[in-house]
Amino acid sequence: MVKVVLVDEKDKEICLKDKVEAHLHDGILHRAFAIIVLNSKGEVLVTRRAADKMLWPLFWDNTCASHPLQKEGYVEAGERRLVEELGFTCSLEIADCFQYQEKYKDVGSENELCTTLTGEYNGEVRPVPTEIADYKWMSVSDLKTDMAEKPEIYTVWFKIALDRLIEKGKITYKDKK
């Protein structure tokens, strides 16, 4: 049974909770992270969530999203999950943090204090099918255009994380208009 770390709004640990239970109903606030990996051309590695995911199955997502284990740092957790989901790892750094809550149909909710990690990678991607249904590299410009035209195919946290990184100047984006 996988457990997530429940926290308060200041990221102070409260206790551990079963991951599924923490995502039921309105969700219980817990630690999470979203990784955005770019290549040397400035393209974002975008992944499509596996079909058997409880929340947002087959939605397009940031490179990797997950939860740190108890006593595991965000960077350490991110580097671990990249290997477990995509068959590679790279150096990551903390770029941002935000809190959000979003309901998914009548299945459950995300209620997360989400740390955004960024890194650069130019090698082979080997997605694990139980985690990732598909992937592609997209320019930030094309990604923002696609998100504007088809917002319903992207996860909420990905849109928030990407917009915040652009806003903070941590990802370069030039509007095509």
Image (tube, rainbow, N blue to C red):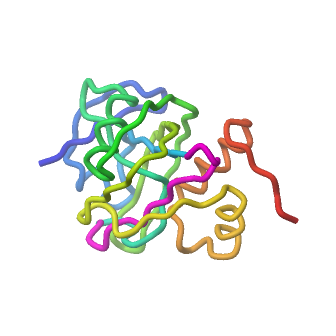
Q: Nearer the viewer, residue 10 or 169?
A: 169
Residue at 32% across / 68% down in the picture? 50
Judged from this view, the residue extending furthest toward the front is 123
Q: Is residue 177 left or right of residue 51?
A: right
Judged from this view, the residue extending furthest toward the right is 177
Q: Position of residue 100 (x, y in %)?
A: 52, 48
Q: Nearer the viewer, residue 58 or 45?
A: 45
**Residue 123, above or below 56:** above
Residue 52 is covered by the magenta coloring? yes
Q: Position of residue 133 (x, y in %)?
A: 34, 69
Q: Position of residue 41 (x, y in %)?
A: 63, 48
Q: Which quadrant, please, contains the C terminus? A: bottom right
Judged from this view, the residue extending furthest toward the left is 1
Residue at 44% across / 61% down in the picture? 47
Q: Give the quarter of the image for residue 149.
A: bottom right
Q: Is residue 82 left or right of residue 19?
A: right
Q: Position of residue 63 (x, y in %)?
A: 45, 52
Residue 175 is covered by the magenta coloring? no
**Residue 128, above or below 79:** below
**Residue 97, above or below 166:** above
Q: Is residue 129 left or right of residue 41?
A: left
**Magenta span:** 39-53
Residue at 20% across / 42% down in the picture? 3
Residue at 25% across / 34% down in the picture? 69
Q: Is residue 102 left or right of residue 57?
A: right
How many discs appear? 0
